[in-house]
Amino acid sequence: MKRVIASLLIPVFLLLPGCGVQEAQEQFFSMDTVMSITVYGKGAAEAAAAARQEVEMLNDQLSRTDENSLISQLNAHAGDGTAVPMDADTLELLSFSKSVAQLLPGDFDITIAPVMDAWGFTGEDRHVPDDDTLAAAMALVDSNKLLIDETAGTAQLSEAGMAVDLGAVAKGYAAAKAEAVLREQGVTSALLDLGRNITAVGPKTNGDPWRVGVADPEDDSQYLCILSLEDQTASTSGGYERWFEENGVRYHHIIDPKTGYPADSGLLSVTVISSNHLLADALSTSLFVAGPEEALEFWKSRDDFELVLCTDQKQLIVTEGLEAGFEFRGEELGYDYQIARR
């Protein structure tokens, strides 16, 4: 297996269970990344296995590269008038994604798939597309043409060539569903590392919050800061995750729906912390595209998430809701930080 950097969110200072505390861990590859689910308490092994099964089932439903998935069926019928039956999970995720596109127009759009394909990010042939190819792909990007009928339980894409890619939200949804499985099993302490999404279920078994490190985008072996999490998800997006170089220029995979090119917003990474798993995942991508000023303005308008913004000027911007459990470690790496307040 190729070496995969799953995340720039790294669990640190993990609990060393005391005598009598059961621990179980499932490590696996799903949704194009390495994942782990660590569970503590009675029945830990069974609960961890059940949570893994839930994630893998969702991957089968949501992957657009699996021709048997619901998303592949939706994409295959683009423009032919077919309303494709969806299960409740997939329909919920499509509806949520449309709502984020309306909330942050131009910064987020799951119909970006044709543009991702034009750049070759779906496969191994990554390259800068020519102007005509990119223009044709951009003409297919429009969430308004994703039609959802929640009563009938169907979805359709109204124009031929359109396609949905749920990569910006699938891991957040998987975290929510996996946590629900753990809760049903009676779990009160667990840590889910689903790639670039870390979910803390409850506190550690000694009652302390989980400690999670946000790594330096330029060197993932170094921490910029440590955060305290409990019953929250932290999701990170950055241009270092998938990229290629052509003619001496580096191009990353987070595409700006307004331009069709990799986002150039002045940010190296965005970490969103929220009790809403889906929101954390979607906002980490969309606010990376938006840039620091728009990201902070959006944060000021809401009270359901916090932010760690890493700028290309080597500055860390941390919103005030994280201040109590925040530990800065970036000084020796040339970073400084500030606390953003409403």
Image (cartoon, grey):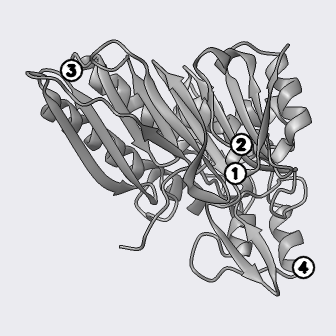
- Quadrant assignment for the N terminus: bottom left
Q: Amino acid at mark 1?
A: Leu
Residue at the image point whose x is 43% and y is 19% from the top:
209
Residue for badge 3: 185
- At mark 4, the secondary structure is helix
Frontmost residue, 34 versus 218: 218
Structural distance between the alpha carbons of marks 1 and 3: 43 Å
Nearest to N terminus: mark 4 or mark 3: 4
**Residues under numbered marks 1 and 4 in contact, where contact means CB atoms less than 8 Å apart:** no
**Residues under numbered marks 4 and 3 in contact, where contact means CB atoms less than 8 Å apart:** no
| Mark 1 Cα-neighbour bin, 10 Å: few <14, some 14–19, many ≥20 | some
State the image coordinates of residue 212 (x, y, percent, origin top left).
49, 34
Frontmost residue, 2 versus 91: 2
Q: Amino acid at mark 2?
A: Glu
Structural distance between the alpha carbons of marks 1 and 2: 5 Å
Labels 1, 3: front one? 1
- Quadrant assignment for the C terminus: top right
Residue at the image point whose x is 43% and y is 69% from the top:
3
**Residues under numbered marks 1 and 2 in contact, where contact means CB atoms less than 8 Å apart:** yes
- At mark 2, the secondary structure is helix
- Find residue 132 and name its label: 4
- At mark 3, the secondary structure is loop
> On the rendered structure, is 210 left or right of 103?
left
Q: Amino acid at mark 3?
A: Gln
Residue for badge 2: 331
Labels 2, 3: front one? 2
Q: Residue furthest left?
A: 20
State the image coordinates of residue 68 (x, y, percent, origin top left).
40, 60
- Find residue 333 and name its label: 1
Labels 4, 3: front one? 3
Labels 1, 4: front one? 1
